Image: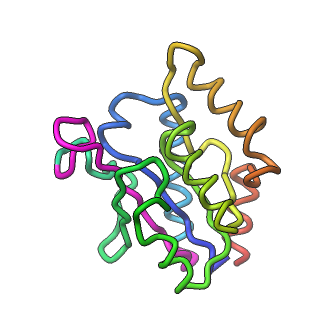
Amino acid sequence: MRNCPLLVVDVQTGLVKEHPYNEEVVISNIKALISLARNSNIEVLYVRHDDGVGEELEYGTDGWQIYHEVAPNNGERIFEKHYNSVFFKTDLKEYLETQKIDTIILAGLQTEYCIDATLKSAFDHGYKVIIPEQTNSTFDNEYLSGEKLYEFYHYKIWNNRFANVLPMDKVRTMMIEN
């Protein structure tokens, strides 16, 4: 798993302060994965979304910052994006190719937007994607609760189609045994 980075997408202050579904568990699990990755010499890659001037995730604002509990260490790579998928108009794909990476562990916000778009783009580019359970989240909307969106994407859309959705314990074991 050394050549299988942890990709932490859009865990930014502006989103976390709005309290997504299962927030405490998700942040705790992402923190645990980051710590385990660092201790296992697995690269942690970050993604930060810029929604533009006047928006909650505007470049340089407090809301745009990566949430302090999961913040990168000095030298950890951050990919800046303006679209749902981190593969669109960024150099992530080129970076992964130079590192000979074929598998990604994916976590972050929001399930039905940036996680879904990034996962499907990764799949389209031939990457294997691992989604640890309870490491991404979203918000209630007028149609579905955050919980229902989470369950729908994980178990109806993604698992065994675009990704492998795995329990945290299994992902931890895979990372340790790298």
| Vertical side of 127 occupied by 47: above or below | above
Q: Is residue 35 left or right of residue 129?
A: left
x, y percentage for residue 19?
41, 28
Give the camera-side residue of 56 and 173: 56
| Vertical side of 10 occupied by 175: above or below | below
Task: Give, as a single range, the part of the protein colored magenta.
Answer: 39-60
x, y percentage for residue 46?
42, 62
Q: Is residue 68 left or right of residue 104?
A: left
Q: Main secondary structure of the magenta part?
A: loop
Identify the residue at horizontal 68%, vertical 36% (top origin).
153
Count of number-bearing discs: 0
Instruction: For the C terminus, give its image quadrant.
Output: bottom right
x, y percentage for residue 102?
67, 75
x, y percentage for residue 3?
62, 80
Identify the residue at horizontal 38%, vertical 65% (top origin).
79
Instruction: For the N terminus, give its image quadrant.
Output: bottom right
| Vertical side of 142 occupied by 114: above or below | below
Q: Quadrant of residue 125?
A: bottom right
Q: Is residue 48 left or right of residue 127?
A: left
Single out the residue that lies furthest toward the top.
142
